[in-house]
Image (cartoon, rainbow, N blue to C red):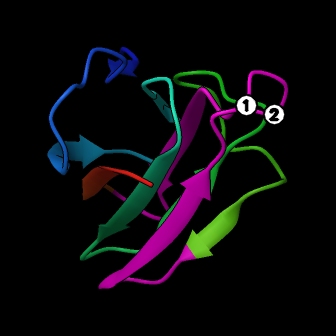
């Protein structure tokens, strides 16, 4: 599975559905700037912002997103603490993951 590159996104809100995400990391590259990120699915997910590596097992430091719920994060635009990518994975089987990017 290849990383999903959203770095060229210029129109907001931006909505992307990634189909059939499995239980290993789907890496998503984020555009520069202050971003509000919303992620969810009809299936339970994990999301991580550290130890991101496309196709790898999800790291220990991750957050669970229950099925049919959304997680919203406001991400910094500072060069020193910027989150440039995140990983998402289904907790079991596969999931169609909904990603919404907004300028914060």
Residue 82 at x, y = what percent? 71, 31
Residue 26 at x, y = what percent? 44, 34
Query: Which quadrant of the structure image shows residue 50?
Result: top right
Which residue corresponds to mark 2? Answer: 81
Which residue corresponds to mark 1? Answer: 78
Q: Quadrant of the C terminus?
A: bottom left
Q: Nearer the viewer, residue 4 or 92?
A: 4
Residue drawn at point x = 28 percent, y = 14 percent: 8
Q: CA distance from mark 2 to mark 1?
A: 6 Å
Say which element carries label 2.
Answer: loop
Q: Tell me where the magenta segment starts and ends, as one range.
A: 65-93
Say which element carries label 1.
Answer: loop
Q: Nearer the viewer, residue 55 or 29?
A: 29
Residue 9 at x, y = what percent? 24, 25
Instruction: Classify residue 66 as left or right of residue 11.
Output: right
Q: Quadrant of the N terminus?
A: top left
Instruction: Using the image, tell me which numbered label, if any, was put on residue 65.
Output: none
Residue 43 at x, y = what percent? 32, 74
Counting labels gives 2
């Amino acid at each position: 599975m290849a990383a999903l590159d959203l770095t060229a996104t210029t129109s907001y809100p931006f909505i992307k559905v990634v189909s059939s995400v499995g239980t290993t990391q789907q890496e998503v590259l984020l555009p520069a700037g202050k971003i509000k990120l919303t992620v969810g699915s009809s299936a339970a997910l994990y999301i991580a912002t550290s130890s991101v590596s496309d196709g790898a097992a999800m790291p220990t430091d991750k957050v669970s997103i229950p099925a049919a719920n959304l997680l919203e994060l406001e991400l910094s635009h500072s060069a020193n603490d910027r989150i440039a990518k995140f990983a998402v994975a289904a907790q079991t089987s596969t999931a169609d993951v909904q990603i919404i990017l907004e300028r914060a």
